[in-house]
Image: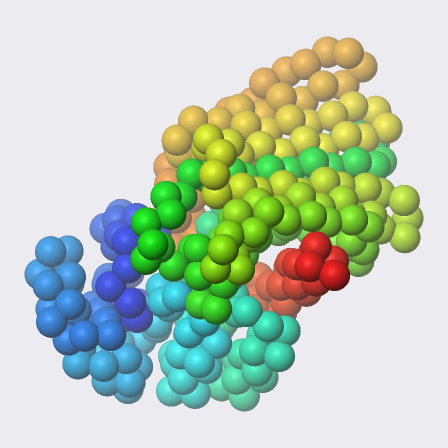
Amino acid sequence: MTLRIGILGAARVATYAMIAPAREVDDVVVAGVAARHFGRARAYAADHGIAKAYESYDALIEAPEIDAVYVALPPSLHARWSIAALAAGKPVLCEKPFALTLADVDAMLSAEAAAGVLLMEAQHSHYHPLNKRVRELASNGAIGHVHRIAARFDAPVADTGSELRYIRDVGGGALWDLGVYPAYWIRSLVADSWDVTSASQRLHAGGADIATDADLATSAGITATLACAMDAPLAAWLEVHGTLGSIKVRNPLAPQRGHALDVTIGGVTRTETFSLRASYAFQLEAFRDGATGRAPVTRGADSRATMALLAAIDAKARS
């Protein structure tokens, strides 16, 4: 069975997160696209070899020839259209951040439960073998008891005046756009509840954060630092320190662009590398398998914990 996916939003992210991997993943095809304006959808479909452009988001969601929906819209629209697709019985792969409020996330999870189909956040780095190995090393005792984690993702985003990531009301800001990754990396390694002990932000005139830094801790005494910025050179890394050793990861975000995993135990460091296949292809395989019942996959409920952490950081920084 081929999973026919429709894209909501003629977005740049869809070109590398959905259209490109769909060309190499078995039993998946991008079958349609809808945009805010029909002309934009038609042009996008023609540019990317997509069979059909739909006149509206509703038309794509209701189309019988569409089996699943990829939500690539601005974050402020994620909840509304994910819920609409789920109500139509369509599995949903939703871009990050999942939503902008916990109330919206809860509404999405309720819609998922009512529909009985998959709702999955597009946390693509999770599915790459590099990050699977990091989680394994952190949990199997190889570096002892984990007591400290540090994670950062910076990416330069030009302030053009119309760039959505500088507009807070639509979900812009470094924390929601970039910080969602290190927040998830930290949570994936230590699933305990994290408290925000301190947080700070540099704000844009439009209210969105240009950069956010936060210190976190669990009741067991594990600590973590999270950092993200939109006015800094590209940087993505993760460090995990345990009682017996440490893990340092270069580029946990997109390992296909080059990466390294340094494991230091007893003063001896070994370096591991993994597949250069795109993290988005591994993600799409996971979504295909979860949507078609081939294999279980992390569902929307896990993303609520990440969103709760982001919301707590934001509230602490602005208090």
**Colour convention of the picture:** rainbow
Instruction: Name the residue rendered at 90%, 44% in the picture.
Output: 221
Residue 275 horizontal/vertical position (percent): 43, 32
- For the question of whether residue 3 can be seen, the reply is yes
Q: Nearer the viewer, residue 168 or 243?
A: 168
Residue 164 horizontal/vertical position (percent): 38, 59
Q: Quadrant of residue 42?
A: bottom left
- For the question of whether residue 106 can be seen, the reply is no
Q: Quadrant of the N terminus?
A: bottom left
Q: Is residue 82 above or below residue 203?
A: below
Instruction: Name the residue rendered at 32%, 57% in the picture.
Output: 162
Instruction: Name the residue rendered at 59%, 47% in the picture.
Output: 202
Residue 47 horizontal/vertical position (percent): 11, 56
Q: Is residue 138 left or right of residue 152?
A: right
Task: State the residue lying farthest toward the right.
Answer: 220
Q: Is residue 178 above or below residue 296?
A: above
Q: Quadrant of the C terminus?
A: bottom right
Q: Is residue 49 left or right of residue 65?
A: left
